[in-house]
Amino acid sequence: MAIERRAASPRDGDHIHSKMGEGMKKYHGHCHCGAVQFELDSELNLPMQCDCSYCTRRATIFQMEPITNFQLLKGRDEMTRYGSKEISDHFFCKTCGISTFTYLKDKGAVVGAVVNLACLDGTDTARMKPMMVDGKNL
């Protein structure tokens, strides 16, 4: 399972591939207390919200990126995880409890990062219009 960049089609809601282009920017992200820090290369062009039981309770707007666009800078030992461990690991800070990102897996290999956009410096999630993901039926 490869993680690919996709953008929502304005006509019918289907997804189409999009190329990483001029909008690519490096974002710095962190938990509330700063123990966990990371960088994300992204266009932030497809914010999402999921309606699965876990995501509904944490109310996160997120962006999915290939793992090559994500780098954990600090805090590997400051995090704990929750998740299926077969397809995902949701990480959060042991100190402040903020859910910072999720690793997506395929056959045990980490292939993508799903980043909590509220953890990125300079983003305003209140102004975003996320695409809804039907996580209840995955």
Image (tube, rainbow, N blue to C red):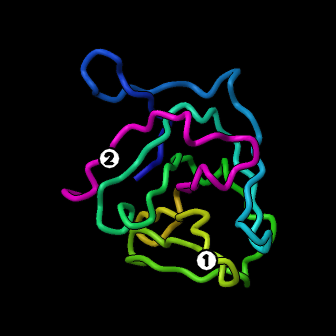
Residue carrying label 1: 97
* Residue 27 percent location from the top left of the image: 75, 44
What type is the residue that disc 1 sits on? Answer: Gly
* Residue 40 percent location from the top left of the image: 70, 48
Q: Secondary structure at mark 2?
A: strand
Question: Quarter of the image containing the C terminus?
Answer: bottom left
Check the image and report above or below for 82 versus 66: below
Q: Residue 29: which quarter of the image?
A: bottom right
Q: Which numbered disc, 2 or 1, marks the residue that appears first in the sequence?
A: 1
Task: Indicate left or right for 50 with 42 as reference.
Answer: left
Residue carrying label 2: 133
Distance from Cα at disc 2 to Cα at disc 1: 24 Å
What type is the residue that disc 2 sits on? Answer: Val
- Residue sitting at the far top: 11
Total marks drawn? 2
* Residue 125 percent location from the top left of the image: 57, 42
Check the image and report above or below for 2 versus 72: above
Task: Indicate left or right for 125 with 26 as reference.
Answer: left
For image coordinates 39% across by 68% down, the residue present is 87
Residue 39 numbered tag? none
Q: Secondary structure at mark 1?
A: loop
For image coordinates 48% across by 56% down, the residue present is 60
